[in-house]
Every structure is written in C-alpha cells, then in structure tokens.
Amino acid sequence: MQHLITLFDITPDELRLILKTGIEIKSRLLAGDRPDILRNHVIALLFEKPSLRTRVSFESGMTQLGGRGLFLTDDVGWGKRESPADFTRVLGQFVDAVVCRAKQHDRVEQLAQFDAMPVINGLTDLCHPCQALADVTTIQEAFGTYEGKHLVFVGDGNNVAHSLALICAMLDMRFTLACPDGYEMDAAWMKRVADHYPNAKIETVRDPAKAVATADAIYTDVWTSMGQEAEMEARRQAFANYQINGQLMAAAPPTARVLHCLPAVRGEEITNEVADSEQSDLIRQAGNRMHAQKGLLVWLLNRAWIKANVQ
C-alpha cells in the first residue's frame, strides 16, 4: 500500500507526476471546471495540532474533487480507548485515506504500519511533505520551472527545512540553509538524503546575506515552533540576524521570491515590508497547499484519471 509519510516514500518521477497533476487540476479549477475525480471518496483528518491551512485545504480540496473530508476530534479516542491496531484497522473500513498531523513522527508511522488505508503526513516534528509540494508548485508558477532553481531557507533547520532539502535533492534544485550555530538540520536526516541522492546540491551557511545572493526563492519560518515555547527568548537572540527584511532582500537578486509556510510572527522572522511586498508569494503559496494536495490525493486514489488526463 502506498503512503506519504516522508518524500522518501516516492520516487522523483512520481513526485513530478504528483506536482504536474496538481497543476493540471488547478488550471481546470481556474477555468471553472471541477471534475468529480474522487466522487464518493472519503478521507479522515486526524490532528493532534491546531491547523488552518492543512485542515481547510484538505477538506475543501476533497469537496471540490467530489469527495468528502471528515475532521476527527478527540472523541474518536486515538491512542486512548483501544489498541493502535484496532483503531487503525477499523478506521480503514470507513475511509479511503487518512491525513495525520501529529506531534511526534512515530505516531504517523504507527498508523501506516498496519496498511489499513493510505496515510498522509500532514505535519510531524520531523518533516512536512505536503508543505514542500505546495512550495515547489509556487516556485514553478513564479519562474515557469523548478528545475535548477536555488531555494534559500533562512532560519531554523526544522521539519519544514528537512522536507525542502529533500524535495530539492529529488528535483535537482539547489538548497541552502542559513542558520546560526546549533540550529542545523538533523544529521541523521541529512545522511539519509545524501545516501539517496548523492548528487544533491545542499549546503549550510552562517551568513544569510551571502546565502541569498543567488537565491531564486527566499524562505523562512517561525523561530519558535509549537512545543518550543520554553526556548522562545533564547531563539529570539540566536536568530536576531536572520530576519527577512528590506536589508536582506537588498542582498538578493531583484527577481527573488519570498516564501513562508505560515503562520508568521510578523516583525520577528519576517517584516511587514517584505511579507506584503510585490516579491512576496505567501498567499499564493498557502493557496497552493490545496492544489498540490489534490494532485497527491488523486495520485493515491485515482491514478486512472491521471493516466487519461495528465500523462
């Protein structure tokens, strides 16, 4: 059974097809066409963390595809009332796939191990593959292609950075992380990326101005993620010189686009001046969560449509 726990679960060719499918479905939507590609399909949304983009994009996307998304609240008793095997296998009797947004990565892996239904990682502490799909879609729209583009992430080497480094390796893009000492990406994750994609163009630097000098897209995320609140003051000090502001943008090419997975702490990791500038793709990027995820859902649940309409 096919899952998307991390982007390691798919090949570069499969990734390109998912992205192409999402773009095709988006173009049809903009033309007023909403084909019932997933008519009578149901996905479950199983979340341990609050969400705007992930929840609404999946629910709306399924509705536009002719299916339905069910948001499961705490009363379903995930991990509380019954064994993980019973919970997952029963859920698989009712739905076609489940999107899980979990605090710990092994929670999503646990759902997938029973092969009861396709499991999609909607965010964990390790990675955020659906966000990376939307980000590359946004870069393609901005430049006409993602091939060979340089994506610079300024900030913490977190779960979002992990998925971005991997997707860049898969698509022959260049990825640079500009971060302070001690906030690099996980070494075990990066070794896995290098083992799978030995020709990957990935680097970590300290100077954000040098990092963005050749950037096509400049990306940032909050300095303090959910669950790291106790580190807030230390992180503010560590990242003080890693803000996306007018001064940093002046060091980048004038064609560079600005990305942020949102929600943002405006005035901290990014200024209003940049977030609301003509170079900003923040809102389009958020919207592309739905379109890219539609491509993923159709790839998982109706490949016959892709064969007839995309390939």
Image: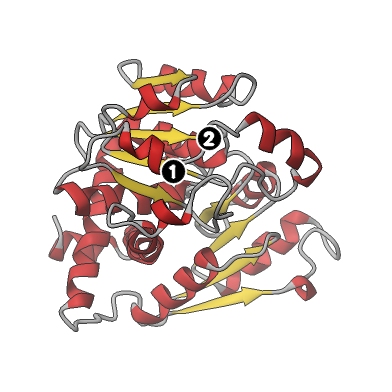
Percent from the top left, x then y, of residue 109?
62, 44
Helix, strand or loop status at disc 2:
loop
Amino acid type, residue under disc 1 in the picture: Asn
Percent from the top left, x then y, of residue 160?
51, 42
Instruction: Point out the image quarter for the C terminus.
Output: bottom left
Residue displayed at 73% across by 63% down: 87
Residue 2: tell me if it is visible.
no
Decide: is 67 above or below 232.
below
Q: Earlier in the sequence, mark 2 or mark 1?
A: 2
Decide: is 84 above or below 74.
above
Q: Is residue 293 left or right of residue 243?
A: left
According to the picture, the residue beneath numbered tag 2 turns out to be 155
Q: Quadrant of residue 13?
A: top left
Residue 287: tell me if it is visible.
yes
Amino acid type, residue under disc 2 in the picture: Gly
Decide: is 69 above or below 246.
below
According to the picture, the residue beneath numbered tag 1 turns out to be 245
Helix, strand or loop status at disc 1:
loop
Residue displayed at 74% across by 42% down: 232
